Image (cartoon, rainbow, N blue to C red):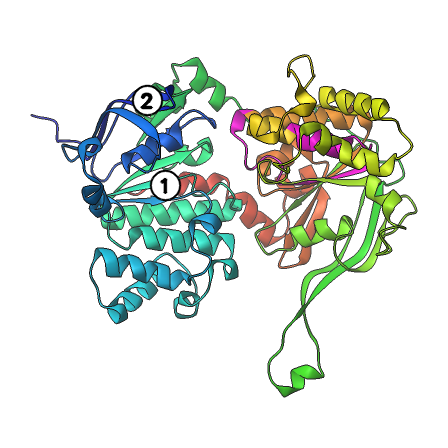
């Protein structure tokens, strides 16, 4: 019995830029209706492999074969590729906020695809777009049809991207890290939705990701890439239970660990004391009466907690729960009600009077690529806070402190020639996050706010950064506030946990009490979301 022809087959695919190979001799096939996951760290060649299928790589030298239903796409004309893109092969990109047109409503963008690819009249295309938004689980699709991307949440934008990709009923969907920046429950919802739509339409899916927990419960087969080479591939169950390649075993073993976390001393005076913290945003009203009556949206209701030196408070909750508003209030970046006390100091709203406190509270952001200025050298980035808070220091003293702090976060000048004069683009994501850590630590703060510090990083790099944070906390006795949707990160880093739902603190306590013995239904639902990944696509 002959093997059916593959829907997509890559044969000895090679991709190079300026003569430098980034993908070297990849062979991979996908059958109709099959789910295949392409796994690997940043720089392994996953995304460029997917983009090469649609010939979306400018100035790339492609060789080998990309066979689509037996025809080599590398030999197709631009006009032929235009017909295939979106119509037969569609793609969901990692960050919908940058992939969607900010000047068009999401409904108009979906309708445009239907008018161009299916030649539907405008009215029919609009009606079909509303139906697609409804199918992808967006509430009130008629109203969301007229919304712009910035008016939707992250999960809603990703659903809108999915609706657009499915508009032409493709035979193959390329999903490039579609759940990376989403909350745990939203990640599961998106994967479950993708599984349901895949079963309903019969399309094949190539999932590109570094989230092995999702791969385990979604893919039929898994292919592992390392530095442009396909090092291992096979059925999902076989690869997870009996990995053959050392790199695959390394990825599977890269789970956050609590081993290096200091126990902390609860008898010490708190670094920060928060009591009755509430945050309200003014909202525009409508009608004549709105001129005389102000309206507010309450993002956080009366939160109270302490964080002691050398200890970590973890904050968990879905998008819109108030996590980021809480962090901004602690950083003195927005007005709030209640009391926030840092060893006797409080935010006053005056830049001059708050200068001392600014050095005591620092932040590390989620995205290491967007949080460092591309126009400034590493020396300028890391020394900026020091120059502001220690103006009496000489240039030699500043440089010595900067180099010592960079070495402390794992970037010694001996291993990175001319380190202080290089720019952020010359470093990987993990190295940039280390630089961001050095920028925060160089002024010796008492509290470090970590806003999803590892969600944009590969699993192996994530493990390295978490170990580094544990060591820095043990060495410096610094307090952390960690905001994350990753339960594994909380288990590795937190001493106490605060659970937020719609601005309300629904549960708080030690990490063992909250994560192992949750009392509130919402906390139990968040914890249940992790093992429930096993249910994704179980019934095929």
At which x and y percent is residue 62? 28, 26
Residue linked to disc 2:
233
Rendered-image quadrant of the C terminus? top left
Which residue is at the front of the view, 20 or 93? 20
Q: Is residue 326 left or right of residue 271?
A: left
Relative to 332, does residue 430 appear above or below in the rendering? above
Relative to 283, does residue 19 appear above or below in the rendering? above
Do we see residue 253 in this rendering?
Answer: yes
**Residue located at (87% from left, 55% from top):** 348
State the CA–CA distance, disc 1 to disc 2.
Answer: 18 Å
Q: Please state which of the two labelled residues, at mark 1 or mark 2, is closer to the viewer.
A: 1
How packed mark 1 is, by other alpha carbons closer than 10 Å (few <14, some 14-19, many 20 or more), is: many
**Residue located at (33% from left, 38% from top):** 56
Element under label 1? strand
Relative to 149, does residue 77 appear above or below in the rendering? above
Q: Is residue 455 left or right of residue 400?
A: left
Q: Which residues are magenta?
A: 434-460
Residue linked to disc 1:
175
**Residue located at (27% from left, 48% from top):** 86
At which x and y percent is residue 159? 41, 54
Looking at the image, is mark 1 or mark 2 earlier in the sequence?
1
Is 444 colored magenta in this rendering? yes
* The residue positioned farthest toward the left in the image shown: 1
At which x and y percent is residue 466? 64, 28
**Residue located at (28% from left, 64% from top):** 128
How packed mark 2 is, by other alpha carbons closer than 10 Å (few <14, some 14-19, many 20 or more), is: many
At which x and y percent is residue 44? 43, 24
Which residue is at the front of the view, 11 or 275? 11
């Amino acid at each position: 019995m002959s093997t059916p022809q593959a829907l997509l087959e890559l044969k000895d695919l090679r991709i190079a830029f300026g003569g430098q190979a980034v993908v070297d001799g990849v062979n991979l096939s996908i059958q109709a209706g099959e789910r295949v996951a392409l796994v690997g760290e940043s720089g392994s060649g996953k995304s460029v492999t997917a983009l090469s299928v649609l010939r979306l790589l400018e100035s790339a030298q492609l060789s080998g074969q990309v066979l689509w239903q037996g025809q080599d796409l590398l030999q197709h004309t631009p006009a032929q590729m235009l017909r295939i893109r979106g119509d037969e092969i569609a793609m969901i990109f990692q960050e919908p906020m940058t992939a969607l047109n900010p000047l068009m409503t999401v409904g108009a963008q979906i309708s445009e695809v239907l008018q161009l690819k299916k030649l539907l009249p405008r009215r029919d295309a609009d009606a079909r777009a509303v139906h697609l938004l409804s199918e992808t689980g967006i509430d009130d699709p008629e109203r969301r049809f007229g919304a712009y991307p910035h008016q939707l949440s992250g999960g809603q934008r990703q659903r809108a991207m999915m609706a657009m990709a499915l508009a032409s009923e493709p035979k193959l969907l390329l999903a490039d890290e579609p759940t990376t920046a989403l909350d745990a429950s939203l990640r599961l919802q998106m994967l479950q939705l993708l599984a349901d739509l895949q079963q309903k339409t019969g399309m094949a899916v190539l999932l590109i990701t570094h989230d092995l927990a999702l791969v385990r419960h979604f893919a039929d087969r898994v292919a592992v890439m390392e530095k442009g080479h396909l090092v291992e591939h096979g059925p999902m169950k076989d690869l997870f239970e009996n990995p053959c390649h050392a790199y695959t075993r390394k990825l599977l073993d890269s789970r956050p660990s609590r081993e290096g976390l200091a126990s902390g001393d609860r008898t010490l005076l708190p670094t920060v004391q928060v009591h009755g913290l509430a945050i309200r945003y003014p909202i525009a009203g409508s009608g004549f009466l709105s001129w005389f009556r102000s309206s507010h949206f309450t993002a956080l209701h009366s939160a109270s907690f302490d964080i002691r030196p050398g200890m970590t408070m973890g904050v968990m909750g879905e998008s819109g729960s108030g996590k980021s508003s809480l962090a901004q209030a602690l950083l003195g970046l927005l007005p709030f009600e209640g009391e926030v006390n840092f060893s006797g100091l409080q935010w006053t709203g005056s830049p001059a009077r708050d200068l001392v406190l600014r050095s005591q509270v620092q932040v590390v952001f989620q995205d290491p690529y967007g949080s460092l200025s591309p126009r400034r050298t590493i020396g300028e980035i890391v020394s900026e806070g020091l120059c502001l808070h220690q103006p009496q220091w000489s240039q030699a003293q500043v440089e010595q402190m900067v180099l010592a702090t960079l070495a402390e976060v794992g970037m010694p000048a001996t291993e990175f020639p001319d380190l202080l004069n290089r720019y952020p683009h010359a470093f990987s994501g993990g190295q940039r996050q280390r630089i961001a850590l050095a920028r925060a630590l160089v002024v010796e703060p008492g509290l470090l706010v970590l806003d999803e510090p590892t969600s944009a990083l590969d699993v192996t790099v994530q493990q390295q950064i978490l170990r580094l944070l544990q060591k820095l906390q043990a060495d410096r006795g610094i307090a952390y506030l960690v905001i994350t949707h990753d339960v594994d990160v909380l288990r590795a880093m937190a001493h106490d946990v605060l659970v937020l739902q719609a601005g309300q603190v629904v549960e708080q306590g030690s990490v063992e009490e909250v994560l192992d013995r949750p009392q509130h239904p919402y906390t139990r639902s968040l914890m249940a979301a992790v093992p429930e990944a096993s249910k994704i696509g179980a019934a095929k």
